[in-house]
Amino acid sequence: MRYISTRGGIQPIPFKDAVMMGLATDGGLLLPESYPQITAGQLESWRKLSYPELAFQVISSFVDDIPANDLKGLIDRSYATFTHPEITPVVSADGVCILELFHGVTLAFKDVALQFLGNIFEYILAERHEHLNIIGATSGDTGSAAIHGVRGKKGINIFILHPHGKTSPVQARQMTSVTDANVHNIAIEGTFDDCQDMVKALFNDLEFKEKYSLGAVNSINWARVLAQVVYYFYAWLRVTDTGPRPVGFAVPTGNFGDIFAGYVAKRMGLPVAKLLLATNENNILTRFINRGDYSLSAVVSTVSPSMDIQVASNFERYLFHLYHEDPARVRAAFDELKGQGRITFTPQELDQVRQDFCSTSVDQAQTIETIGNFHKETGYLLDPHSAVGVKAALDMLPADMARVCLATAHPAKFGEVVEQAIGAPPPVPSAIAALDGMPTRCEVMAADLDKVREFVIRNVE
């Protein structure tokens, strides 16, 4: 299995090199040359597997440069940190199936991928006797999950940029209360898009990237997406246990990584009837799917801050496939976005998009109302991001379909919003209660690339 860039500027590379490269050296994103195809018989044979066993089956089909026993060990170690025996259990409530992705160390779906990625990084670095400086941007949950995935690991420093004051208080404390020597939090006075732009700029400075051994934990890293593919298979197998039926996935989406993982699963042969992309007011992806309007606008701060994104990094991976694997067309599209603030599409391309996805936008009032109504009717508590997906599923997916809604975070991570919705604070798990009073460390900084670069150099050297 070899990996190529969406922009066509690198020779195919093996999996371990793809993990370490993160962002391709030509500025593109890495993808496998082809997708393994899973037959109906294989899928049925996976039905009784545990989550780690299923993860090995899916991930190993993309990895041929790590011995099987080593890969099994990395996977088992990654999911031993989860508090639920099923890792990502499926719970039925009010006609939908909730795929709970928040049983990891930071109570967010990012743990599913970042516990695995942290262990993969450590394994490769030990094998190669190398050191890595991870730089990432977060709109909320990626940062804490990445930090907890690599804290204290040998050969790794991590620098995480987040928009100052624009994450939830719990998300901020989960990051800044980790004071291990290899962890550096940077609060940027700006938006997530500012943070993401600066991270991309550092990776595109190839001399700087090579000199300081930069690595990526954002979903620009292919291993992140790959780990998330697994829970689409797991959920599909669980909701079809009693017999065949159509399955649709409702995915609250900001950076397009989570729903792209579902798209990969479908390309591998998973019988997905619908991929429903749910956005908040930052709805560039919904406008694109429904109206063909992929044009930039200002980021709106909402009660679902992890989705407060305009430029979704993983969208480029989908465009590569939409453009029939033509890297020149991908490069032209991003030149158009940079120059004109939009990307235009042909009618035929938009027809294909609507075959691949459907979409709707859920505003803040609807989000809060959904949390309240769903709790009143079922007793189940949703966080605001998960509520966006549930509202979208109830509105857009037919009742005779298994409507799988990805629950991306524990409701206690957004306690103020939940309290506003139900009139009482959510129960607080011990992992969050323990954050109160813990010492914190964070550098507040202007959205200035040179200052960020200087901070990284100073702390690496």
Image (tube, rainbow, N blue to C red):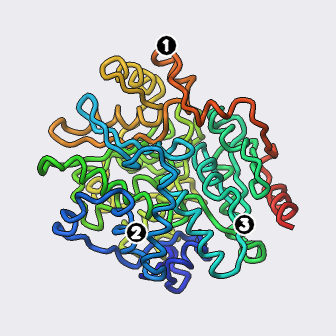
Amino acid bearing label 1: Gly
Residue position for label 1 = 423
Residue at x 31% of width, y 37% of height: 91
Circles 1 and 2, Cβ within 8 Å, touching? The answer is no
Q: Secondary structure at mark 2?
A: helix
Left or right: 413 in relation to 401: right
- Which corner quadrant holds the C terminus? bottom right
Q: Secondary structure at mark 3?
A: strand
The percent coordinates of residue 324 (x first, y second) are: 36, 73
Residue position for label 2 = 59
Left or right: 383 in relation to 152: left
Q: Earlier in the sequence, mark 1 or mark 2?
A: 2
Amino acid bearing label 3: Asn
Residue at x 73% of width, y 77% of height: 210
Q: Earlier in the sequence, mark 1 or mark 3?
A: 3
The percent coordinates of residue 80 (x first, y second) are: 48, 55
Distance from disc 1 to disc 2, alpha carbons, whole Å, reads 43 Å
Residue position for label 3 = 133
Foreground label between 3 and 2? 2
Q: Secondary structure at mark 1?
A: loop
